Image: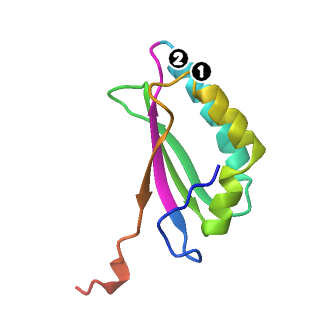
Amino acid sequence: MTITPPTNPDEPVALYAEFTALPGRGDEVATMIAGLTVDVRREPGNVTFDPHRRVSNPLEFFVYEVYRDADAFQAHITAPYGAVFNAALGDLIEGEGSVLTWLTPVPVESVSR
């Protein structure tokens, strides 16, 4: 699987992934994402991997992710445990898989007060 993030290859890669569990499968998905979180946070290039559930609908999951650079992100998406997770997740969520939203930081340091 090759996903090319829209960024300079030397800059951090930031995104959030979102998906919705099928009815009755939310807790199973939560357990799976908790296990994946342990693995991802051990990756040398991972900066942040924070999964969340929507308060108003606990079947909806959001994962905020930041990687050191494009190489670190590529290492993440080719990790064997990720493939196992994504294969299992496909049967537990609505749609074709996670929807990825690419993020870029707002340059706060350029704001003068």
Quadrant of the snapshot with the C terminus: bottom left
Q: Residue at x 67, y 39 (%)?
A: 36
Residue 17 image position (x, y, % from top left): 48, 45
- Which of the numbered marks, if any, corresponds to residue 57? none
In the image, residue 7 sits, relative to residue 61, either above or below, namely below
Q: Secondary structure at mark 1?
A: helix
The part of the chain drawn in magenta is 14-23
Left or right: where does residue 30 sit relative to residue 6? right
Residue 13 is covered by the magenta coloring: no
Q: Residue at x 32, y 28 (%)?
A: 56
Q: Secondary structure at mark 2?
A: loop
- Estimate the spatial distance between the alpha carbons at disc 2 and disc 1, rounded to whole Å: 5 Å
Residue 94 image position (x, y, % from top left): 45, 25
Q: Residue furthest right?
A: 80
Q: Quadrant of residue 35?
A: top right
Residue at mark 1 = 28
Q: Residue at x 49, y 61 (%)?
A: 14
Residue at mark 2 = 25
Residue 1 image position (x, y, % from top left): 65, 49
